[in-house]
């Protein structure tokens, strides 16, 4: 079909190279919908939720709307 549902998860641990102590640990969850509007065009709507488990419990929520245009099989233009 023309629509594709995507999901992802990232567990990123940042450490200090000198001491080896943990600076931050990010957990990022994402969910997106890609919709092909033509052979060369794809529209994407995605949502990302992230947390930082380094003690301060920072969180962020991000929405993304983009359009991709395939100039060829190897070249794509992106608009955010």
Image (cartoon, rainbow, N blue to C red):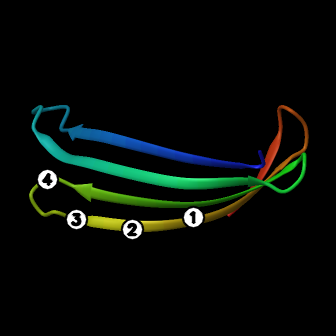
Mark sitting earlier along the chain (3/1): 3
Q: Quadrant of residue 11?
A: top left
Q: Of the numbered discs in the image, which one, if any, rests on residue 64?
A: 1
**Residue 50 pos. (x, y %):** 33, 57
**Residue 5 pos. (x, y %):** 59, 49
Q: Is disc 4 in contact with disc 3, using a CB cutoff of under 8 Å?
A: yes
Q: Is disc 1 in contact with disc 4, using a CB cutoff of under 8 Å?
A: no
Real-space Cα separation, disc 4 to disc 3, in angstroms? 8 Å
Mark sitting earlier along the chain (4/2): 4
**Residue 20 pos. (x, y %):** 12, 31
Q: Of the numbered discs in the image, which one, if any, rests on residue 61?
A: 2
**For this rendering, which residue is in front, 27 or 21?**
27
> Is 67 on the left-hand or right-hand side of 47?
right
Mark sitting earlier along the chain (1/4): 4
Q: Of the numbered discs in the image, which one, if any, rests on residue 54?
A: 4
Mark 4 neighbour density, 10 Å: few (under 14) some (14–19) many (20 or more): some
**At x 13% / y 41%, what residue is drawn?**
22
Q: Is residue 4 above or below residue 19?
A: below
Q: Could you say whether the residue bearing mark 4 is in a helix, strand or loop? A: loop
**At x 57% / y 64%, what residue is drawn?**
64
Q: Could you say whether the residue bearing mark 3 is in a helix, strand or loop? A: loop
Mark 3 neighbour density, 10 Å: few (under 14) some (14–19) many (20 or more): few
Q: Is residue 47 above or below residue 73?
A: below
Eye-nearest disc, 3 or 1: 1
Quadrant position of the C terminus in the picture = bottom right
**At x 9% / y 57%, what residue is drawn?**
55
Q: Could you say whether the residue bearing mark 1 is in a helix, strand or loop? A: strand
Q: Can you identify the residue that label 3 sits on?
A: 58
């Amino acid at each position: 079909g023309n629509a594709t549902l995507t999901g992802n998860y990232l567990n990123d641990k940042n450490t200090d190279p000198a001491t080896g102590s943990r600076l931050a640990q990010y957990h990022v969850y994402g969910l997106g919908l890609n919709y092909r509007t033509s052979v060369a065009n794809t529209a994407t709507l995605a949502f990302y939720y992230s947390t930082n488990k380094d003690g301060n419990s920072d969180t962020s929520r991000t929405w993304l709307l983009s359009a991709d245009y395939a100039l060829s099989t190897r070249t794509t233009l992106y608009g955010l």
